[in-house]
Image (cartoon, grey):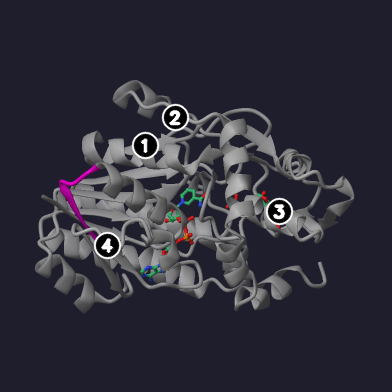
C-alpha cells in the first residue's frame, strides 16, 4: 500500500483527483485532510467515501499537532498538497488567510514530511506565480517569479520554500505549475462556473475591464493525469509546468457559454477591472511532454460542453452554495462595480 496524505481533497481539483485515483487504484491508501472552508464540500467525494482505502479527516494543515499525528498514525510516505485559499478576488478582499494556509500550512507539511522521511512531496502550484505575459511568449519553468496578487505571491512563497527544503534537507519535493482549470465541482466564484450559473439564472455576467485578458484553459482531469504522472515519475527537486495550449480571452469564454446556453449577449456587463489584473497567461509544458510523455486527452469543445451539462444537471450542488454564505461574498465583490 502507498499511504498518501492528500490535503484539500474536498475542493475542486483535489476531489476530482481522489475520485479518479480511487476508482482506478487499489494500491493507494488516501488520507484526505481538509478544513472544509467555504470551498470544501464533502458532496464532491460521494464516489469515494465508502472505499476502504480512504479516510477523511476534518482539520487544518496549519495545525502542527494534528499533521504530525496523522503522519504517525497512517505511516504517511507520500504527500500531495492541494490545500489552499485559491481565489484571487478573495485575496484582494483580505490577504491574511492566504499567507496562513498557503505559506504557513505548506511549512507545517514540509516539516512533518522531513521528520517522517516521506518518499515524495508534490506541491500543487500555479502558473500565476510567473506574473503576467505580454502579447508574445510562454511561461517556462525558468521564467522568473513575479506574482501580482496576494494569492499568487503566497503560492510563489510556498514554491520557494519547497525548493529550499529540497536543497537543504534533500526532501524529495516536486512542484507542478498548472494553468486555469475548468470542469465539474468548481466553486462558482471562478470565471467559468460563475458565468454558466449566472446565464442559467438570466443574471448579468460581470466581465472585468475590457474582457481581453487571456487565460490558458485545461480540463481538470488532464491536470490530474499530469499530477499523477509527476507524482509517480517526476524527479525530486524539479518543477513541471502543466498546460493544454488553449489560450482564450475572457470574452471568448463568456460568449461561448452564452451561445451553448442559447442566451443573449446582452447579459454581459462590463464592470470595474480587478486591481493588479494579469493580462495574459500561457504555458509551455514541453518539459512535461518530452520528459514524461504527458499530453492532454480532452478536447476543449467537448470538455466545456460536458462541464456546462454538469452544471445544468447538478443544480442542487450549486444551489446549496449560491443560497448560503456565498451570497455575502457575491454582494461584497460585485455590488458597486
Ligand atoms: P479550491 O478552493 O476549490 O479547494 C481548496 C480546498 O482546500 C478546499 O477543500 C478547502 O476546504 C481546503 N483548504 C483550504 N484551507 C485549508 C487548510 N488551512 N487546511 C486544510 N484544508 C484547507 O481550490 P482548487 O481550485 O481545487 O485548487 C487546488 C490547488 O490547485 C490549490 O493549491 C491551487 O492553488 C492550485 N491550482 C488551482 C488552479 C485552478 O484553476 N483552480 C490552477 C492551478 C493550480
Ligand atoms: P478566475 O476564474 O478568478 O481565475 P484567475 O484569476 O486565477 O485566472 O478569473 C479568470 C479570468 O476571468 C480573470 O482574467 C478574471 C476574469 N473574471 C471576470 O472577468 N469576471 C469574473 O466575475 C471573474 C470571477 C473573473
**Nearer the camera: disc 4 or disc 3:** 4
Question: Residue 278: image x %, image y %?
Answer: 64, 48
Q: CA distance from mark 1 to mark 4?
A: 26 Å
Q: CA distance from mark 1 to mark 3?
A: 27 Å
Q: CA distance from mark 4 to mark 2?
A: 36 Å
Q: Residues within 10 Å of mark 2 (few under 14, many from 20)?
A: many
Q: Quadrant of the C terminus?
A: bottom right
Which residue is at the front of the view, 223 or 257? 257
**Nearer the camera: disc 2 or disc 3:** 3
Can you tell which mark lies on residue 50? 4
Q: Earlier in the sequence, mark 4 or mark 3?
A: 4
Residue 57 located left or right of residue 271? left
Residue denoted by label 2: 285
Which residue is at the front of the view, 164 or 251? 251
**Nearer the camera: disc 1 or disc 4:** 4
Residue denoted by label 3: 195
> Does residue 195 appear in this view?
yes
Q: Quadrant of residue 71?
A: bottom left
Residue at the (31%, 24%) spot, across then down: 291
C-beta proximity under 8 Å, tags 1 and 2 = yes
Q: CA distance from mark 4 to mark 3?
A: 33 Å
Amino acid at each position: 500500500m502507498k499511504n498518501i496524505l492528500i490535503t484539500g481533497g474536498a475542493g475542486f481539483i483535489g476531489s476530482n483527483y481522489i475520485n479518479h485515483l480511487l476508482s482506478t487504484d487499489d494500491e493507494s491508501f488516501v488520507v484526505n485532510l481538509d478544513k472544509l472552508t467555504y470551498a470544501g464540500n464533502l458532496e464532491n467525494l460521494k464516489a469515494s467515501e465508502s472505499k476502504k482505502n480512504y479516510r477523511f479527516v476534518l482539520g487544518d494543515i496549519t495545525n502542527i499537532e494534528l499533521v504530525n499525528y496523522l503522519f504517525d498514525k497512517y505511516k504517511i510516505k507520500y504527500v500531495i498538497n492541494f490545500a489552499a485559499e485559491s481565489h484571487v478576488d478573495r485575496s484582494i478582499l483580505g490577504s491574511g488567510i492566504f499567507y496562513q494556509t498557503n505559506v504557513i500550512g505548506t511549512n507545517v507539511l514540509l516539516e512533518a514530511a522531513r521528520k517522517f522521511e516521506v518518499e515524495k512531496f508534490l506541491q500543487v502550484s500555479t502558473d500565476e506565480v510567473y506574473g503576467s505575459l505580454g502579447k508574445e511568449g510562454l511561461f517556462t519553468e525558468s521564467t522568473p517569479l513575479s506574482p501580482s496578487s496576494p494569492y499568487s505571491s503566497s503560492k510563489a512563497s510556498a514554491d520557494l520554500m519547497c525548493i529550499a527544503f529540497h536543497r537543504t534537507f534533500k526532501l524529495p519535493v516536486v512542484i507542478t505549475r498548472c494553468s486555469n482549470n475548468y470542469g465539474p465541482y468548481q466553486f462558482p466564484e471562478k470565471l467559468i462556473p460563475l458565468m454558466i450559473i449566472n446565464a442559467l439564472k438570466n443574471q448579468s455576467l460581470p466581465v472585468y475591464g475590457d474582457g481581453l485578458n487571456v487565460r490558458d484553459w485545461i480540463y481538470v482531469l488532464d491536470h490530474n493525469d499530469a499530477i499523477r504522472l509527476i507524482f509517480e515519475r517526476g524527479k525530486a527537486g524539479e518543477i513541471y509546468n502543466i498546460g493544454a495550449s488553449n489560450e482564450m480571452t475572457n470574452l471568448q469564454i463568456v460568449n461561448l457559454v452564452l451561445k451553448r446556453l442559447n442566451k443573449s449577449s446582452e447579459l454581459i456587463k462590463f464592470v470595474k477591472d480587478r486591481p493588479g489584473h494579469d493580462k495574459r497567461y500561457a504555458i509551455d509544458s514541453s518539459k512535461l511532454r518530452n520528459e514524461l510523455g504527458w499530453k492532454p486527452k480532452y478536447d476543449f469543445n467537448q470538455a466545456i460542453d460536458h462541464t456546462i451539462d454538469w452544471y445544468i444537471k447538478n443544480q442542487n450542488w450549486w444551489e446549496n452554495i449560491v443560497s448560503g454564505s456565498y451570497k455575502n461574498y457575491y454582494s461584497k465583490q460585485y455590488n458597486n462595480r
